[in-house]
Image (cartoon, grey):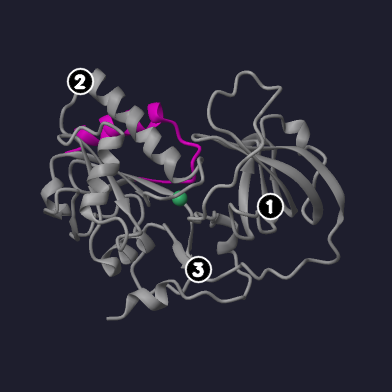
Amino acid sequence: MNFSRTVFRLTPIFCLFTFCLWFTACGRQEKADAPQPTSNATVALKQQVFDVKGEVKEVKLDEKTVVIKHEEIRDYMKAMTMPFEVRDTNEIAGLKPGDSISFKLFTTDTDAWIANVKKLGEVAASSDDDDSFRRIPDFEPLAEGSALPDYLFTNELGQAVQFSAWKGKGVAITFIFTTCPFPTFCPRMTQNFVEVQRLMSAGASVTNWLLASMSFDPKKDSPAVMLNYGRGFKYNPDHWTFLSGDPVTIAMFAGQVGQFYYEKDNTINHNLRTLVINANGTIRKIIPDNKWTPEELATDLKAACETR
Ligand SMILES: [Cu+2]
């Protein structure tokens, strides 16, 4: 069976999937020396600022988010379409799809947002959706309520992990790669898991819980790399595991739950999925994007532990 190629075949044909698949650049370029913030005393972390231009694709005021097809951000990110957060919705209140804008992208180790949004004009007609794509499913998609397939992965200690061995535990799985540079994507998923680990350990009403961070860059994220990464976040090996393994198995499982990624020009573009698995082995939730909170996940995870 040849899943790996077809699953991620891209076509320029616009399709509805584009709407729900937000990809971000996760390039591995070196970070440039950034201007230091001078006026914002609350920013203690290393901050970078980039001047960017792009085209508005979608405005989501209630999520303080605007989806922008942006040009290449030099020394940081390839050109692509992705969501950006704003701190102040007034920044984007007057925008509509097709507006061409300039803005500043601010990034710290843990966050990213845009500001100084200025409308430059309107893009003639609809610019070609060259980064749109269509998924060719070759596999059975999994939904909430589906049984978790019994796949085999490798943990951070190099040990084989079979999903069926998790029966009896409530499990939260998220997808990452360890070198992802964009603060609100993989780094936020890991930071959220740090907090979920703390909440679940403190709560202690249930003990049969597990967190699993699965890499979709297994070539680079070997067990040793994953172990080192986990230690960097003070993971508790009794309750948190870091999985890698066979790229085809990972691609197949990821594709089944709507986690997409593709590698291009030494960059991995991807969206986000976090799963909650009941102790009886069924999928309780498939959570998209990065808006979920550690508190919400901890609540779901506790309930999952009790669904035997
Ligand atoms: Cu990422």
List the residue tagged with mark 3: 264
- Percent coordinates x, y for residue 125 in the rendering: 84, 67
Q: Is residue 294 magenta?
A: yes
Give the extent of the magenta segment. 285-308
List the residue tagged with mark 1: 68
- Judge whether 284 appears above or below 110 on screen: below
Q: Nearer the viewer, residue 168 or 145?
A: 168
Label 1: how many residues lie within 10 Å, few (<14), some (14-19) or many (20+)? many
List the residue tagged with mark 2: 204
- Judge whether 25 appears above or below 34 on screen: below
Disc 1 CB within 8 Å of nearest ligand 1 atom: no
| Residue type for callout 2 | Ala
Q: How many marks?
A: 3
Query: Quick check: 99 left or right of 279?
Result: right
| Residue type for callout 3 | Lys
| Residue type for callout 1 | Ile
Q: Nearer the viewer, residue 222 or 46?
A: 46
- Report the residue at 68% width, 68% height from top: 129
Task: Locate the C terminus and report the quarter of the image it occupies.
Answer: top left
